[in-house]
Amino acid sequence: MMQRVRVLQLLLFTCFTSAPPAAAGSDNHLLTAPHPEVVEIGTDFTATCMIINTAEVTADDLYWNLSQATVPKEQYTEINTTALNVTIHVSGEKNEWLLCLCKKVSANVVLNQGKFMHGIILRKGYRPTKPENLTCIALQEESRISPTITCSWVAAGRQTKDVATTFTLILKVINELSHNMSTEGNSASVSLSVFPHFMELEIWVEAKNKLGTIESERLRRDAGYFVKTKPPANIQIISENNFPTSLLINWNRPVEKQYVGLTYEIRFCQDGSHDWVYVPHVDTAKDIQSFRLQNLRPDTVYVTQVRCKNDREGFGYWSEWSSNATKRTPEDRPTSKPDLWKIVVESDVGERRVQFICKDPVFANGRVLRFDMRVQEQKEKVKNGSWESFPVNRSEADGRSDHRSSTDLKDILLADKKSVKVYVTAVNSVGKSAAASLFIPEKAHELAPVEELRGWVHGGQMWLQWKPPNTEAVTEYVVQWVSGDGMDWQRENRSTRLTVIKGDLKKFVCYTVSVYPIYSGWTGQAATVQAFLEQSAPEKGPTVRLNGRPGHNEAELVWTEIPQSSRRGFITNYTIFYTSGDDVLSVTVPSNTTSFTLTSLSGNTKYDTWISASTIAGSAEGSRHSFTTLKYAPGEIEFIVGGASFGFLVVVVMTMVICISKKDSIKKNFWPQIPNPGESTIGYWSPDYPLKAETPKENCLSGISVLDVDMCDGKTVFDEDKTSLPLKKDKYLSEEHSSGIGGSSCMSSPRQSVSDSDEGGELVDTTASTVQYSSVVASNGYKGQTPSSQPQSAIFSRSESTQPLLDCEENPDMLVQEGSRHQRFLRRPAANDPADFNQLLEMEQQEVLEPLDFCPLEEDSELTLTDEQSADWLPTAPASSYMPQLGGYSQQ
């Protein structure tokens, strides 16, 4: 093939080169060849580019482009200086341009670029492929076969838009002309004048496009091979009362026998079922028009269909199935026992309430009209007890439905120590079934249950598994499931260990499933589990409320369990939410909890609380409840009041005890004893009366201010008084020189004072009045202290102060009275009686020194007063300080 193309290209080249320029008929300097109508995808294509009418360029200046991409030089073949070949592989279904171009070797080429360009359009396609699976059919029209034969095939291979494939159906009748029909599809019909019965036909398909032609396999068959008739008509089913297990079927032929011989196929099933039963073909191979179905169930509706085809082996097509024909078989006596079961309700009075329930027999063979029942105690020897009838009140539709209805028979009270045997038969319009029996033992003698019962859900079904009791006496098992008021059961044989519940279970409903072993009619103990076919979130949450009143920092919550019908699953836990403000707290408790106490709450705070119930599939919240905690805990107010009262009582009692035990100190601190100057004995001091030396006091004050004290010489007070006390009583009492010597001015509050004028002045309301104080300094040591060696004379010192006057100074009358009393109390000591004089001096010294509570100081010691005591006891006269001396104060 490639050699032929090469020869053709050379011939074209020779023609173009030998022709004169005018013969070329074009100003173009490049020419390409060949220009095929289509090219086959997947093959190689060779093109030639020739230079004409110019010697300016050569083959070396040429190059090829395919879809704007330069073809590699390796694919070029230079024939001579004026011709260049290129070979490309055709791929893809999109059309492309193959262009021959010239390099820009001169200005003329650049300016006349259009003359140095020529191309080939490549339209691509596939060769036709052989049609496959050719089939033809001739349908029945009215009572004859149609003369139109319709064929179909599979067009293998691929096609493109520009290279379409046309199919031609060709039908040839032997010794006659052929008939054909063209199409671009996969089917076609050929119409004949009449259907050629009993003649041979030859049929094939031809596929053709621009790249070639190909034929399918030829189909050569008898014309009857292509016939498809209508289904049998007028299907009739006859039910005969004497034959309750059979039905007779009749039908009509769809086409005359002289044209096509037929064979039939019959199938049937119970109404509502899709499990078809096919009658063996050998029984219907003959050309028949009736058939009897046998071994059917009595009182059962059956659906029947029939179809037909050419009776010649391997010829023709099966017709469609006829329309459904239904019929009920006649009734017959029940051939199975009723299914008897019981519901036992325990009580605490030593007896059980037993309710007997019965299902229709599996093969009731008709509508059950009544049940006959007999109850016999185990100890009775007479077996023929009285039968009691229980009519069944159902509609005819319910009585004949495939669902096995249950009927409540009778309730009895059975003592725990008694056992009974119950027998039941089912009765229909034809006869009575065999008796079903159920034995209930004494409660104390119930037989062993199954072991390790468990249930789960798989594939949308509820499965049960158990282990049998440790005995070989089990004859069967009863699986019972209860939900609310509904109850159902099924029976399993003795070898069953794993089963699925066959009842109509509902989603989101809790079932209590029990398995009872049956020992030759005697019921054993039940093993029970609870299960859901599918779980979901509860319909609602529990309702929460407070149990009593909330406390100060705790509150007890109680709630009721969600009703079983609203749980929709097993409750896994409860979550208690409570919030105050923006903070939401939660506590999770087990599913068996119905109360909980919240602790660590804040007092006098409002809380909102609610409870969420959870299952494995979700949760639901209940209604909210609000409460406010107490401001005080119960008993807290009583405790506070009681504690405060007790504390107050303790304080009062302690205060009274302290006051009683420390009355002298309290009196001294709050009401200090102010010496009355009118009672002073300083006027009686005289050197003629020696004083007795006293020992120093032991009770000294701590924390007092420091004052320098002159150490006295070793003379006794008695000797000192004889030389330094020549004072007279009238002098002592005079207003000019004394205003309370030895008295305390710091303990007196500011008050009105009396001036020291000799003419009795008027009262002045001021705290700045000048008060004259005086002190006596003895010449000898104080209370046995050693005075200085130099003799000292008695000095009477005065100071002026803003200290208020004493009562005696403000009231002269009182002073006179006090003076007279003092005169009555004191007497002048005798000059020759030292004891009497010492007693008087001791009293005077105590009276003078008691307010300051001074102690005798040792040599080179310091006397210290607190700041408060210094302010209280020292006179407030400016620029004056006082030091204790013998018998008084000395101004420094």
Image (cartoon, rainbow, N blue to C red):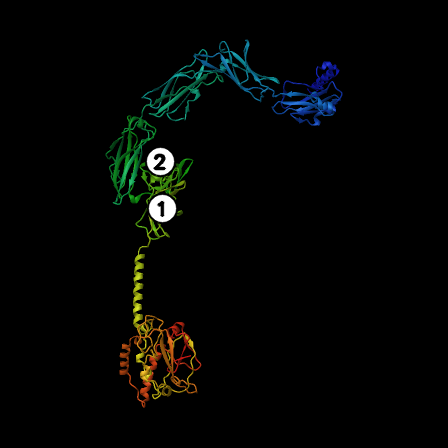
Foreground mark, 2 or 1?
Answer: 1
| Classed neighbour count for the residue bearing mark 2: other residues with Cα under 10 Å, few (<14), some (14–19), many (≥20) | some
Amino acid type, mark 1: Thr
* Spot occupied by residue 212 in the image (x, y as percentages of width and height): 61, 17
In the image as oriented, which residue stretches furthest toward the left?
Answer: 386
* Residue holding disc 1: 609
- Residue 474 visible in the displayed image: no
The quarter of the picture where residue 104 lies is top right
Up-down: is 555 above or below 819? above
The Cα atoms of the two marked residues, 2 and 1, are separated by 50 Å
Secondary structure of the residue carrying numbered label 2: strand
* Spot occupied by residue 878 in the image (x, y as percentages of width and height): 40, 74
Label drawn at residue 491: 2
The quarter of the picture where residue 832 lies is bottom left
The quarter in which the N terminus is drawn is top right
* Spot occupied by residue 714 in the image (x, y as percentages of width and height): 41, 87
Up-down: is 510 above or below 103? below
The quarter of the picture where residue 463 lies is top left
Residue nearer the viewer, 488 or 415 = 488
- Residue 800 visible in the displayed image: yes
Label drawn at residue 340: none
Secondary structure of the residue carrying numbered label 1: strand
Label count reads 2
Nearest to N terminus: mark 2 or mark 1: 2
Up-down: is 885 above or below 454? below
Amino acid type, mark 2: Arg
Residue nearer the viewer, 519 or 612 = 612
